[in-house]
Amino acid sequence: MILHILNRPPSSSLVYREALAAMSDTDRLLLVEDGVLGALTSQVRHFQQVEGRLFALREDLHARGLEGQCDASVQVVDVDGFVTLTEEADKTVSWF
Amino acid sequence: MILHILNRPPSSSLVYREALAAMSDTDRLLLVEDGVLGALTSQVRHFQQVEGRLFALREDLHARGLEGQCDASVQVVDVDGFVTLTEEADKTVSWF
Amino acid sequence: MRYALLVQGAPYSSQASHSALRFASALLARGHRLECVFFYHEGVYNAARLAAPPQDEPHLHDAWCALNAEHGTQLQVCIAAALRRGMLDEREASRHGKHGHSVEPPFELTGLGQLIDLGQSVDRLVTFAP
Amino acid sequence: MRYALLVQGAPYSSQASHSALRFASALLARGHRLECVFFYHEGVYNAARLAAPPQDEPHLHDAWCALNAEHGTQLQVCIAAALRRGMLDEREASRHGKHGHSVEPPFELTGLGQLIDLGQSVDRLVTFAP
Amino acid sequence: MSSHALATGDLLVILRHAPHGSSWLREGLDAALVAAAFGQSVTLLFQSDGVLALARGQQAGPLGQKSTAPTLDMLAMYDIESLFFVEDALASFGLTQQDLQLSASGIPVTAIPELLAGHKQILTF
Amino acid sequence: MSSHALATGDLLVILRHAPHGSSWLREGLDAALVAAAFGQSVTLLFQSDGVLALARGQQAGPLGQKSTAPTLDMLAMYDIESLFFVEDALASFGLTQQDLQLSASGIPVTAIPELLAGHKQILTF
């Protein structure tokens, strides 16, 4: 299982498509930095195909004042959880 | 008349939408750097609304080996023509 | 006409500096005047005096210096953007108690107000960003 | 586990350095070891020794140095990416006939081969890009 | 375009980037403040991801990276009171005017060209 | 996914950026060459705008900015022969295999995960 890390939002960059295309059925996707905009209820449709395997970094949502807007389908993890995700994955791939 | 300058391609960045939204009916759009990918026949549909006011920089098409793929609807100018476009415009706005 | 350029991209990382220098040559060849190039955001790295690119690549720092020498174009660097990025001239280095400096003339550290002034005083301001 | 980080973003311009340092703290707190941070692309600017950010902002250069001092994490900078961007240590400066230097220990200029080595020798390599 | 201008002035600063992820927003706001301090009439347009700069409840980032939210509160002190955001952009993040930390005017996408036309100089960040 | 692997190896380098506009492509290729020089088996995947790195007829950029095209010709010397591009990406620019400067294998988007799974390390540029 690969942990994919995405730091750009689907509202301005199309790199999320490349990340999704590279994901197997068991890979996970973590949204970080400006990438957390994709976790908002109004944006999360872009990540439908990885529902249940979609994570977002709490600290980055919080800094942007968006923790309350994060969709319920997204698993919110703090940076400690980010480390855990990297432990559980065989390797990580960053998309930017 | 404003000259808008765009250096990102519609294949990976959505900033072209912001540039188009900001353009009046008489403004012009110049594609430069990686932005020239938008001038290819296969990509130029993204710029339909500014047909006749769409330019692309010859040197940047040439460096990428893409001069032959540029759509006939796009006015190809060299860097001297780029300067002329800035002379003719009241001001320039860069989108990146 | 009187032009100024705003460069926001770091050298080598993006095409911004190459594009700006190319545009500068073309506007000068057409008889215009290039008053100033203002470096902001990552553009401040263009002032790095120690740049040592491979010999078969364009030397962007030297190209800026040549622009200044041949056409009197001022090379102004936003001081706030520069300091945090480690781009200090001798005066700022000593003011911050640091030994050595990374920026030297013809590049000058100036306030962002210079960019605003330029916007008013020149006929055309063109931005080159990453 | 043994970790390494690859940092490709310039400090202050993007969040990459902040994110990498935050991740570094978290992995160390969980008992992992951080062998090395490798700086490539614009990440090489993290090594700028003269960085003078405002006092109310994080001092990223010093945060990297603290990581080295407290945890023995190596700070390796791709030499090819660094030279063209004006990031030179004393040895490279004298080799290129330049006076002064912009990089000093604990940052080390090394070849890209070190990154490849790291990829093989550590358990996890995580990239932070702009 | 309507016959009376939405806003006119010396400088329009267009902010397109979200807070924290890059320094574009901060450096754009700095340019606006300096221009105002130099006596220029300045208008801000928050477009695309830039509308998130207006969101209520922003905090410092990792390592204490400063938030731009306090800078927004300084705009009024510098007489920058002409603040616009693109309505569609705000809506695309599920936010409404009530979610904003300060008062700004929503405009439709179609009104953007008029804003650009009404200013002598335009800077995009 | 098929039962036999498309390609396996030590390192997969994913190149997503077009030539000239940024140094990502050049620096990604450099990483691939160094890995190969260190004896690793290296695969390249050209994805999205990165497929344009393969286009025939590239030239030096402004001020003589070096093209990455000659570097591609060096790949074979370093025993990097496992080159893939995403078919849809190439087609999106109106290009076909005949427009490429060297031989590379087109793969459908659906085959990308298998490539990633088959390599110990992955670097994206």
Image (spheres, coloured by chain):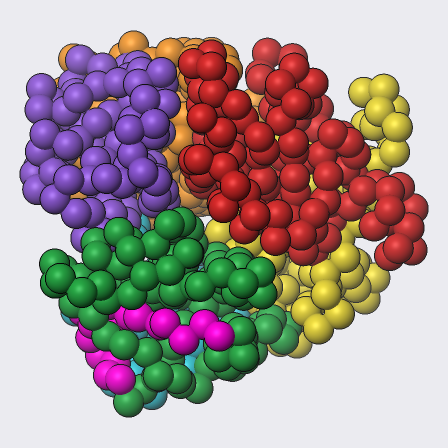
Chain colours: A purple, B cyan, C yellow, D red, E orange, F green
| Residue A9 position in % (x across, y down) | 26, 38
Depth order, front residue of F38/F109: F38
Answer with the quarter of the image where residue D88 lies: top right
Instruction: Check the image and name the residue furthest to the front.
Output: F4
| Residue A18 position in % (x across, y down) | 24, 52
Residue appearing at x 49%, y 46% in the figure = D120
Residue appearing at x 12%, y 38% in the figure = A50
| Residue E17 position in % (x across, y down) | 36, 35
Q: Residue F83 in magenta?
A: yes
Q: Quadrant of the N terminus of chain C?
A: bottom right
Could one spot residue C38 in this view of the protein?
Answer: no
| Residue B61 position in % (x across, y down) | 41, 77
- A78 is higher (above) or lower (below) than C73: above
Depth order, front residue of E9/C63: C63
Residue appearing at x 68%, y 69% in the figure = C57
- F66 is higher (above) or lower (below) than A86: below
Question: Which stretch appears magenta?
Answer: F79-97
Relative placement, left or right, of C117 versus F99 is right
Answer with the quarter of the image where residue C23 lies: bottom right
Answer with the quarter of the image where residue E80 lies: top left
Depth order, front residue of C12/D5: D5
Could one spot residue F60 in this view of the protein?
Answer: yes
Relative placement, left or right, of F67 versus A8 is right
